[in-house]
Image (tube, grey):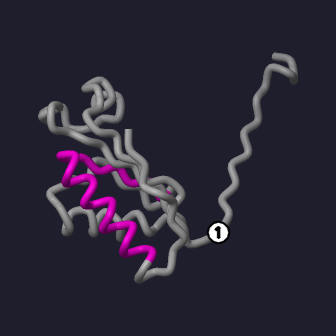
Amino acid sequence: MELQDKMRIVQELVPGKQVTLAHIIANPDPVLYKKLGLDPKTDYAKSAIGILTVSPAETAVIAADIAIKSSGADVGFVDRFTGTLIITGTVSSVDAAMTAIMDYVQDKLGYAVVEKTRT
């Protein structure tokens, strides 16, 4: 293998208290659930997926707790090492959970937050 055929990826995390992504996918295609390893028993007609990334990464655990307690959303995936949280549920429950998370981390923890987006 020649040197030019090798790819080097450098990943860098800048410390900070921030939400870098807060996105809601309303009515996702069922194949997306399958590819993400989420519950296949979902009622896709009323479903949504919420994706959140936070730094420091451990904040994802707090965000997951807030999501569960603030709405009917379920935690599909949480990673305290990368700061990734995926929540699922109805569009309204995922939206309520994301709003509660964003409000808490901004108002109580002093995080910089991005605008919540939706497709």
| Residue positioned most to the right | 3
Determine whether 78 is above or below 10 in the image.
Answer: below
Determine whether 21 is above or below 57 in the image.
Answer: above
The residue pinned by badge 1 equals 15
> Residue 5: x percent and y percent?
80, 20
Magenta segment's dominant SS is helix
> Residue 46: x percent and y percent?
15, 38
> Residue 55: x percent and y percent?
54, 65
Q: Residue at x 37, y 72 (%)?
A: 103
Q: Residue at x 28, y 47 (%)?
A: 76
The one nearer the camera, 12 or 112, is 112
The one nearer the camera, 23 or 60, is 23
In the image, the segment drawn in magenta is 83-106
| Residue positioned most to the bottom | 108
Q: Is residue 71 left or right of residue 6?
A: left
The one nearer the camera, 60 or 109, is 109
Q: Is residue 4 left or right of residue 113?
A: right
Callout 1 crowding tier (Cα within 10 Å): few <14, some 14–19, many ≥20: few
* Quarter of the image that includes the C terminus: top left
The amino acid beneath tag 1 is Pro
Snapshot quadrant of residue 107: bottom left
